[in-house]
Image (tube, rainbow, N blue to C red):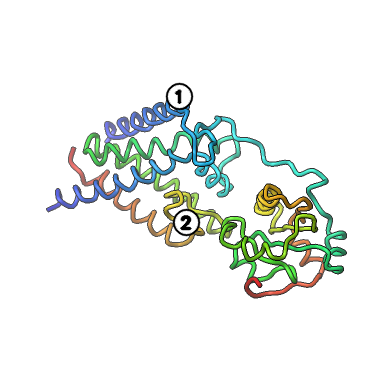
Amino acid sequence: MIRLVNFVLRLVLGGLFVLAAVIKIMDPAAFAVDIQNYRFLPRAMVHPVAILLPWVELGAGVLLVLGVWRRAAALVIAVLCVAFLVAISQALARGLDVHCGCFGTLAAGRIGWRNLALDLVLLGMAVWLTRWQRE
Amino acid sequence: MRRVILQAIIITLASMAVGAVVNAIRSDVDAKGNPRRLSWVTPPPPELGPADLVGLEEAQQLWAESRAVFLDARQPEDFAAGHIANAHNLPVDRFAEFYPEVAAWLTPDGHIIVYCDGEQCELSHRLMTQLRELGYRHVRVLHNGWTVWRRAGLPTATGAGR
């Protein structure tokens, strides 16, 4: 039973990260604007993060779907989720009027509590898969 | 667990390496014809020159004489909560949606004053750039507009755009 649950969680979580990554890789400039709007990172880091971060999402997502180094892949995703959590929280706390940037233009509109809730769910899945998954 | 952490570090670094290589060699372009390859150096914020800005005093005078159209670049919720009286709402993030209605008030040679809120707010700068690209010649930014206008006790209004 737990194996089936883990299998489904892997596909959903990994799939979501692959999707999010591909959208950003297809339009890094738009992602850079989204990052900048968060006014969270120093300006010098905006482009490097826009170039590199989607590939970490992609690498971890693909490995999780394939089931290769699956616990490590889930751990990477968990760390990313924590970083997103911090970024979204500070944007909400400051009342910033920004797009999430999470799924590019697929999820348009202003950032809100829904983004935070989704991130928490994904973080929960990632922590679960890091902890309760067999290699 | 130590092995898992090590693997996680390897996944992260290897993915970054792939990303750096792809960014270096990719030559594809987006729908507007701009290359998708990004520079590692983040470009500096757009510098506003004196010709891009309008002072509160001049803005107030243009407003009183109805010689300028005021455009609020913020989101509709913020606009509804309070804006410069007689201003129109043109959220820069939803430009295509709002522009057709606002366009009726604009002329290429008329004064257009755009504003948002906060010292750091770049919405009005982006709106100015977009309007100039459409051929409006006299677009200027009232820097930190909503705050300075309100603090000066000048006429404001609430409610959705008209």
Residues at discs 1 and 2 both on one chain: no
Characterize the local packing of mark 1: few (<14), some (14-19) or many (20 or more) Cα atoms within 10 angstroms. Answer: few
Quarter of the figure with residue A44: top right
Residue B160 position within the rendered picture, expressed as x and y whole percent measured from the top left: 62, 73
Residue A119 position within the rendered picture, expressed as x and y whole percent measured from the top left: 39, 54
Residue A24 position within the rendered picture, expressed as x and y whole percent measured from the top left: 44, 42
Q: Which residue is mark 1?
A: B25
**Rendered residue at 55%/36% (across/down):** A45
Quarter of the figure with residue B25: top left
Q: Nearer the viewer, residue B12 or B2?
A: B12
Quarter of the figure with residue A96: bottom right
The amino acid on which the numbered mark 1 sits, given as a three-letter code, is Ile
Vertical arrangement, residue A25 with respect to residue B25, above or below: below
Name the side, left or right, on which A122 lies relative to A135: right
Q: Which residue is mark 2?
A: A108
**Rendered residue at 21%/46% (across/down):** A132
Name the side, left or right, on which A10 lies relative to B112: left
Classify mark 1: helix, strand or loop.
Answer: helix
Q: From the image, which quarter does the C terminus of chain B lie in?
A: bottom right
